[in-house]
Amino acid sequence: MLGGVGDISVMLDPEHRDLFLFLSQYSKDRSAQGVAVARMAWADRDAPQERIAVWQDGVWLPPRRGVDADGDAAAWTYPAGAPLVPVSKPWHDGNAAADAH
């Protein structure tokens, strides 16, 4: 199976306002592979659902609420983040060597 995120590290900013989440992305799309960043207000830490924004192309993007086949609200989905550093050797190109960090 291709894709997913993992290897999450979290850092509180010096002013104690925001948590920054650094995560590894294993997308099939090479442009989305690598370490991305998301943030959430420290004040939202006890109720984080739908409050985490992902950094992509110069803006913080919020999650979107999906809709199921009956038109009812479904799970939240988050956009892929922009990698902080582009991969030099992607994961899913058939070559066993990868360099994404």
Image (cartoon, helix red, strand yellow):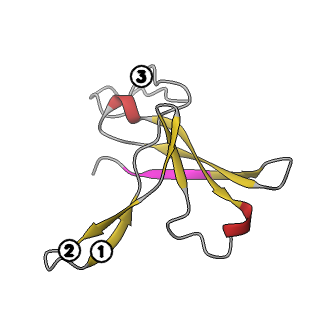
* Residue at left offset 83%, top offset 55%: 16
Q: Identify the magenta region.
A: 4-8
Q: As drawn, is 30 to the left or to the right of 50?
A: left
Q: Earlier in the sequence, mark 3 or mark 1?
A: 1
Q: Residue 26 placed where, x, y %? A: 40, 42
Q: As drawn, is 13 to the left or to the right of 87?
A: right
Residue 74 tag number: 1
Q: Earlier in the sequence, mark 2 or mark 1?
A: 2
Residue under pointer 3: 89
Label 3 to label 1: alpha-carbon separation = 36 Å
Q: As drawn, is 24 to the left or to the right of 92?
A: right
Secondary structure, magenta segment, majority class: strand
Residue under pointer 2: 68
Could you tell me which quadrant the C terminus lies in?
Answer: top right
The kind of residue on which mark 1 rests is: Ala
Q: Are marks 2 and 1 in contact (CB under 8 Å)?
A: yes
Q: Are marks 2 and 3 in contact (CB under 8 Å)?
A: no
Q: Is residue 7 magenta?
A: yes
* Residue at left offset 24%, top offset 70%: 67
**SS label for mark 2:** loop
Q: Is residue 60 magenta?
A: no
**SS label for mark 3:** loop
The kind of residue on which mark 3 rests is: Lys
Label 2 to label 1: alpha-carbon separation = 6 Å
Work out whether 40 lies above or below 95: below
* Residue at left offset 53%, top offset 40%: 36
Name of the residue lying farthest toward the top: 88
